[in-house]
Amino acid sequence: MPNKHTPLLSKESPWEGNSNTIWLGSTITLNRNLEKYKFPGKLPQDKRKQLISLVGKELLESPLLKKPSLLNAEDVPHVEKEFFIEHFLTTSSFQEARAGEAFVLDHSSAFLGILNVGDHLILHQIDCSEELEAAWDRLTKIESKLNESLNFAFSRRFGYLTSAPAQCGTGLVVRVFLHLPGLIYSQKLDEATKRYKEENIDQTGLQGDPTEIIGDIVAFHNRFVLGVTEENILSSLRTLTTNVMIEEKRARSNLKQEASSEMKDRISRAYAVLLHSYQIDALEAFYALSLLKLGVDLEWVTGVDHTGLNLLFFNCRRAHLLCHFSEKIVQQDLPHKRAEYIHQTLKNITLHI
Amino acid sequence: MAEKNPKNLPPADRPLECGECKKTITVRYTEIVGDTITHTNMCADCPELLRRLHGISPSEQIYGLTGQAGLACGNCGTTLEDVRRGHRLGCMECYEVFGDVIFMELQSTSRLPARLLTSKKTVPLHLGRAPGETHTISPSSRLLALNEALKETLSREDYEQAAWLRDQIKALTEESPSSQDKAEDQGKPDAQ
């Protein structure tokens, strides 16, 4: 049965049933290239297609993927590509992907193979069960299986070779998305990250911008891809996120005890904006949803749970909304449709302030 | 790199980066010719900046610095100038041809751990797995992180968070008893 938003993804979605309060999700990405082929930027179109059939065939036959399917980029509508970017929380902008590029999806809706976008093969896995090591293990098994019949470009000095030198080495980028309104509104985020963040970890907002934090979601990822082991990458992110999560819980506990008028006002306003706006843009919705999620955790808001709010973080984004409605929506009607969708989803909530 | 319309500039709260090599912006170059104002954001060692200020072409500048004028990859045609400007590489042989330049670029953009910055050319920079190697990461690393955090939380006498950590540790060890054994093997007998 197809996904309710897009027929290209299966109904099964890892984001459904995600009840996490702080750790919203994580992504693991492995970049690989094949020996004997130039990297995609210098690869002629006929060779690109040859590479897609070669790598695509191996992925489609992989016993580790659930009913995989291959989609040529030119056959995927623009909005569906944008949907993939939102669903898989990718930082590579492949909404402009064209002929000679392709995607491989499987029935879990947690795996995405990207072919010929920057590198020959990008294996991408999403995880929302805080199981970084298991997600990495799954991806590595898929990669090892492919390696039985395909030779990946590798050198002793630089490791796995990628078209962007900053990603050579392990080719592994791990990203963890944490929802940190407690630290942000207590103005303790910088203090916490300064205390626990090592030089090998970078911090960005939801869309990869280092300074623009959207919806109080902070993404941490490994800065070093070369010169570190996979185990180093995973364990340093694990240590950082565990400590930051404790700081966040501590900050939320303090906010609840203090119960300041300022915080109550913020959450009440967020409630009002979400329930009574006629039109709302995605950024404003994220800002208010973050406060509402904090309100649920502080037990100041009831009638919606973290699972519902976590899903709303995805479903109120542009491509998710456009794919959700069966009728065609023009761009200027989107903020109104978003507001309507949010009203509908949050119709049972009550504010206890 | 050149932006003819100042309205196209990124918002002030975003970090500016060199349109060519992605390093941090240090120079904003404005050129007024007739009615046209051209703004260009560049890093300090941008070849484009040198060209605009002193009329030196990028290839001359590269020649001046490295003595390797016109160096290009014989397999894909990627030039030294492309690599220095942070463009994507064209093939795996680029790593042989431009190995030292790539190393310097990774060094200048802080993409290498400090201990590797002085390593010799012959020393492999890569430490992770190689093709054909199987490598499993013990799920106990999550347990180790939780135990470490528990110790710190207890030392701060924050019993509320300590209880949360204990619950997590308990759930994890009940789920997989072997994980705890591994944690204990690694010198963490206080897993519970």
Image (cartoon, coloured by chain):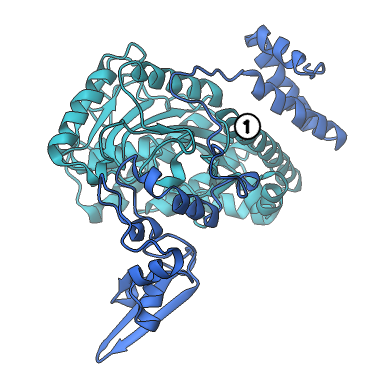
Chain colours: A cyan, B blue
Q: Position of residue B92 (x, y in %)?
A: 34, 39
- Return the residue found at the far bottom: B34
Q: Residue at x 35, y 71 (%)?
A: B60
Q: Amino acid at mark 1?
A: Arg
Q: Residue at x 69, y 51 (%)?
A: A194
Of A224 and A216, which appears nearest the observer? Answer: A224
Can I make out residue A273 in this image?
no
Q: Position of residue A138 (x, y in %)?
A: 45, 19
SS label for mark 1: helix
- Return the residue found at the far front: B67
Q: Is residue A19 above or below residue A338?
A: above
Q: Quadrant of the N terminus of chain A?
A: top left
Q: Residue at x 16, y 29 (%)?
A: A50
Can I make out residue A178 in this image?
yes
Q: Is residue B37 above or below residue B178?
A: below
The number of numbered discs placed on residues in the rendered structure image is 1
State the residue position of label 1.
A238
Residue A274 vs residue A113: left or right? right
